[in-house]
Image: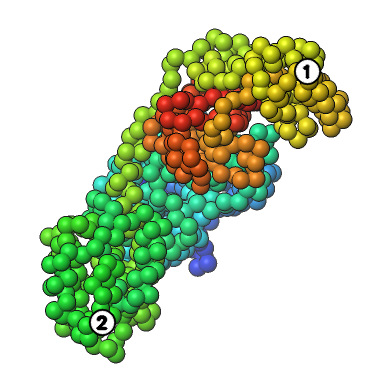
Amino acid sequence: MRKIFYPESIAVIGVSESHDNFGRNIVKNLLDFQYQGRIYPVGNKGGSVFGLKIYKSVEDISGAVGLAVMLIPSRAVPEQFEACARKGIKRVCISSGGFSEFGGERKELEQRLIDVARENDIRFIGPNCLAIINQDHGVCLPFVRMSRFPVGNVSLMTQSGGVGLSFIYMFAAQNLGINKYVSLGNKLNIGEQDLIPFLESDDCTGVIGMYLEEIDKGREFMEAVRGCRKPIVVLKSNTTATGARVAASHTAAIANDDRVVDAALKQVGVARIENMHDMTAACKIFKMPPMKGNRVAILTPTGGYAVILADMCEKYGFEIPPFSKDFVDDVSKHVRAGVIRLTNPLDLGDMFDLQMVAHTVVRAMQEPQFDALILSWIFMRDTGLTSDSVNIFPILDSMLKRIPKPIALSLVGSPSDISQIQKTTDFPIFSSPEGSLRALSILRNHHSSAGELRAQIPIIKEDIDKESIERALDAAGEGGQLGVEALDVLQACGIPTVPVKLAATAEEAVVAASEMGYPVAMKIASKDILHKTDSGGVKLNISSDKECRAAFEEMMKSAAEKVPGAALSGVHVQKMAAQGREMIVGATLNESFGHVVTFGVGGVAVEALGDISIRVAPIGPLDASALLDEIKASRMLGAFRGMPPADRDALKDVLYRVSTLVTKFPRIKELDINPLIAYEEGKGCAAVDARIILR
């Protein structure tokens, strides 16, 4: 990747002398950004541009070419790409559009590029992109005219060139510097998973920001992130379930693509933001020192801000400890009308001296019970708040060197005033109290958990009966389904199950129930009926021989009427499980990320409730805890309605074993355990019903 960003020479293919030629813009950008290497304009009409000779072919260039960027009609790209290969050029940016984004018939052009790149060991960015910018080396390859913008330690990559340009302008308006920028385009050859390791090793990059419309190589992306120590911020669009495949199992129907993406980002400690404006906020907060805890002090100019921020602190999990008596005594000497309540949050509504505000900030930062300060302010010129003789920013900068705690500062006021302040200070300034607190939560999460998440080791259970599992899956065949047989697979995997017997007749059902002991459950046995309840194929709490015979006959009749043509093998008789929490554990195959493990509230209403948490397999200890804690009904796993806490360790063990199962047997497409009965602490859990669908 370094050869793309630090080329010794660049060929710009698609340049002419015409003043409306976009290739000229690329050459001019290189000159304006003071690129020090050789620039070789290339165009079939020849001539010159900005004093540089235009070569008619890249093969006419006598010197070596480190990087080629081309902006020509899409149908001409493969020919020029082949010319680059013959020239020995190993790195290319293809800015031209008109490929698969215009329809499937253009995929042939893309395949030609892939083939040539593979045969000649070429790496390329695009097509359909704005190429790259590297301010550290004077490289600026977008085909629109660019002006120099602040240089910093943020590197951006975006799947949309337009979004990338917007970010560049938004960052510049807030004096937030960018070092490198990549427009990914169609990601035919180089994607985010290739660039993350390079940016991790790049000394000029401190923060990585991304706008992605798809993560098509999810596992590679996660592995790249796991190897990165730097903060990563992602804005992911294309979030609806439109186009998602409808699956037969509960978990696959619930775990649509964006929920999987969201879970994967959490799993590797990536901050996901919801809109473009949050990208600048999320990146600028990393100018602050690390946040080493979760406790905040809040200083505001109004009680309304205090209420808003207090609400948001609870939402984002921040603690708001009280101020010490020494702090209260000190600040109380300087309030004007005595109307300030010296609590946290602290409303500084009648404190108009900025010097005193700065003093209060310093005192709050010295309080050992706080890990960060949230300072929100309304900037008004006509109240004496903005005396030219008092500039708070040098005070804040100096204080951060002495007391390395983050300050989330938001200023609200005249847009022209705020814009001018942002342009003239390096101190990160947020445009709203809410935005500053969201950014602070990203800083806290990165320093508190990202490293642990990326470093955790997946737990693979080795005490499973691989041979028995293999035989059961082989018996089902490709694309096959396992109903009650899935319980045998789970048992071979070390997951406790409730025993079950097949009864072909009513009398066999009575014998099985008598041997197990009433009460029992009865379920229709048919490979053609996946969801038994819908066909009247489930009867619970059968307590006598008479009820057992009647239930058998009724279920067989109901199933035959509701699912005509279904092959009926009889019923499965199962001992009623002891009462506990009904949960669901599952796994499903995602096209990009591979197998994902799901956990949630089980029973017949699982799809209606949709209370499911997700992690990509194989999972580690932090993932297992998150799966239990992230469901909305997580409190029901604690002491609940007279029941003692559920056996969390047993639930985690089931999660590890399901994760192991789908990792070691990738032919499993979908798996449901529903319900999984979770008993009280120390009593374990048991799978009552399950199904497996194979690829």
Q: Amino acid at mark 2?
A: Val
Image coordinates for residue 672, horizontal then vertical, percent = 60, 30
Residue plotted at (36% across, 54% down): 317
Give SS at disc 2.
loop
Q: Quadrant of residue 345?
A: bottom left
Q: List the residue tagged with mark 2.
A: 339
Image coordinates for residue 634, horizontal then vertical, percent = 48, 43
Looking at the image, which is closer to me, 206 or 613? 613
C-alpha gap between disc 1 and disc 2: 79 Å
Q: Could you tell me if residue 377 is visible in this image?
A: yes
Q: Quadrant of residue 477?
A: top right
The answer to whether the residue labelled 1 contacts the one labelled 2, judged by CB atoms less than 8 Å apart, is: no
Is the N terminus in the top left, top right, bottom left or bottom right quadrant? top left
Residue plotted at (31% across, 52% down): 444
Q: Amino acid at mark 1?
A: Gly
Give SS at disc 1.
strand
Residue plotted at (26% across, 60% down): 321
Image coordinates for residue 675, horizontal then vertical, percent = 60, 31
Can you say whether 340 is above or below 471 in the image? below
Asked whether, in this view, residue 275 is left or right of residue 177, the answer is: right
Looking at the image, which is closer to me, 199 or 606? 606
Task: Check disc 2: other Cα within 10 Å, few if <14, some if 14-19, many if 20+.
Answer: few
Q: Which mark is residue 425?
A: none
Is the C terminus in the top left, top right, bottom left or bottom right quadrant? top right
Q: Could you tell me if residue 15 is visible in this image?
A: no
Q: List the residue tagged with mark 1.
A: 570
